[in-house]
């Protein structure tokens, strides 16, 4: 596709459920980032992949959050035993460069609501 | 834990006026970028300025960077109603891959 695609666009989960959020980056983009954006706030960094290697996961808020990119393209962010504080928009971004956050392209995000 | 802080938090101007937004950050950076976000198009990259640059232009946008004060400003000239959006600065530090966004300035341009 022409841009970064995220699915689903909206997800409602009951507290305690596991969820999986998918990101299809722009073809050929080496770098992939996940961000969490709470209402009225700026995006907060979660994790970074360079190809299939997860080089930085310092922003993952707890061990309930797990991300993977096994073949260096599609990435999945998994949240186990969801809590209400996990409600946010989860954004994925990709860029051509390795590491340098140069003109990253963002997807439309997945809005997660935990009830 | 966000590093960038935008000022003002909200700004309302008339179409045709200029809009200035400021951003401050705390640690050494490789580059600073500005993004726009509205409900229709999500987050869109506007402009990047590297740590060794002081000013950059792109169309109606002008960005300045003062590394001694750890601050940047974004000027939008001759604003249009379509410029209504939230604007975020984002910094990438020298120590890793993490890019830190501020809380944003909400700009409203009245037609």
Image (tube, grey):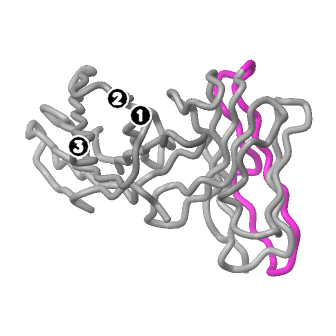
Q: Is residue A71 left or right of residue B30?
A: right
The spot of residue B51 in percent (x, y) is 35, 31
Q: Are marks 1 and 2 in contact (CB under 8 Å)?
A: yes
Tag of residue B49: 2
Q: Is residue A55 left or right of residue A96?
A: right
CA distance for labels 3 and 2: 15 Å
- Please tell me whether mark 1 sits on a helix, a strand or a loop: strand
Q: Chain of mark 2?
A: B
Magenta part of the chain: A1-28
Q: Is residue B46 above or below residue B86?
A: above
Q: Nearer the viewer, residue B73 or B54?
A: B54
Q: Is residue A16 above or below residue A31?
A: below
Q: Residue at x 39, y 41 (%)?
A: B36
Q: Residue at x 79, y 74 (%)?
A: A82
Q: Chain of mark 1?
A: B
Label 1 vs 3, first from the N-terminus? 1
Q: Which residue is mark 3?
A: B68
Q: Which residue is mark 1?
A: B31
The spot of residue A15 in percent (x, y) is 80, 81
Q: Nearer the viewer, mark 1 or mark 3?
A: 3
């Amino acid at each position: 596709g022409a841009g970064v695609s995220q699915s689903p666009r909206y997800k409602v989960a009951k507290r305690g459920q596991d969820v999986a959020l998918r990101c299809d980056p722009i073809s050929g983009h080496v770098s992939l980032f996940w961000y969490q954006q709470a209402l009225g706030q700026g995006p907060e960094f979660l994790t970074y992949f360079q190809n299939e290697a997860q080089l930085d996961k310092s922003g993952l808020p707890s061990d309930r959050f797990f991300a993977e990119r096994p073949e260096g393209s599609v990435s999945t962010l998994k949240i186990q035993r969801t809590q209400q504080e996990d409600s946010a928009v989860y954004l994925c971004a990709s860029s051509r460069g390795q590491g340098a956050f140069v003109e990253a392209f963002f997807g439309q995000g997945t809005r997660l609501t935990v009830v | 834990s966000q590093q960038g802080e935008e000022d003002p938090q909200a700004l309302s101007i008339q179409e045709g006026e200029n809009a200035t937004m400021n951003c401050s950050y705390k640690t050494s950076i490789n580059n600073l970028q500005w993004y726009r976000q509205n409900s229709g198009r999500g987050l869109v990259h506007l402009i990047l300025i590297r740590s060794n640059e002081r000013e950059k232009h792109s169309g109606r946008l002008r960005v300045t960077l003062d590394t001694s004060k750890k601050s940047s400003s974004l000027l939008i000239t001759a604003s249009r109603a379509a410029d209504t959006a939230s604007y975020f600065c984002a910094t990438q530090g020298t120590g890793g891959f993490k890019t830190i966004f501020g809380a944003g300035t909400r700009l409203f341009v009245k037609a």
